[in-house]
Image (cartoon, rainbow, N blue to C red):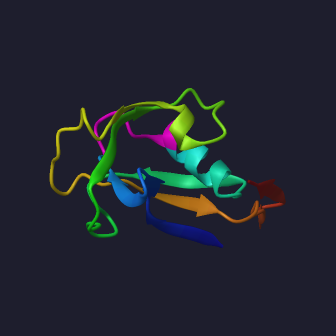
Amino acid sequence: MTYAGRVEIFSYGVWGRIDGSSSWGRTEAEVVCRQLGFPGIVTALKYSPFGEGSGPVLMSYVRCTGSEKTLQQCQYRNWLETDVYENREVGVICKTHELYTDVGGKYLN
C-alpha cells in the first residue's frame, strides 16, 4: 500500500507550496516520507502531479543529503528568494510497509 500527494510545508504561520526545481528527486522525497513516518518511497514527482496548491511558494531548489530528519533541515531557497513558476509543485509516493513478492521462488523487495 502507498500514500501519495502534493508536498506542502507549514511555515511563517501558513501552509505553502514547494517549487519542483531540477533539484527535487529521490533523496528529497525520502526525507519527506521519513518525516511523515513512512519507511520509504516509491518515487519523487515534479510538475504538479496532484494539482496546484493555493498557498504561497515557501521553498524552492530543495537539496537534501539524505541524513536530514525534516525537510526544513535541507538546503533550500526560502520564500524571499523564490522565483515562482507555475506547474512545478512537488509530490511524493511513500511506502507504508515493505512488500515482498514470491517470483519464481525468489522474494523481491
Whole-percent x, y for residue 97 in the image: 75, 63
| Total residue callouts | 0
Is residue 57 toward the left or the right of residue 106 in the image? left
Q: Nearer the viewer, residue 26 or 53?
A: 53
Name the quadrant containing residue 103.
bottom right
Q: Quadrant of the N terminus?
A: bottom right
**In the image: residue 33, left or right of residue 85:** right
Q: Is residue 9 above or below residue 24?
A: below
- Which residue extends farthest right? 105
Q: With respect to residue 70, does 42 lie above or below? A: below
| Above or below: residue 79 compared with residue 5 | above
The magenta segment: 20-28
Q: Give the residue drawn at x 39%, y 31%.
A: 76
**Residue sitting farthest toward the bottom:** 1
Task: Say if the magenta span includes residue 23.
Answer: yes
In the rendered view of the protein, which quadrant contains the C terminus?
A: bottom right
Q: What secondary structure predominates along the stretch shown in magenta? A: loop
- Across and down, in percent, residue 14 comes to 39, 60
**Residue sitting at x 50%, y 40%:** 28
Q: In front: 39, or 14?
A: 14
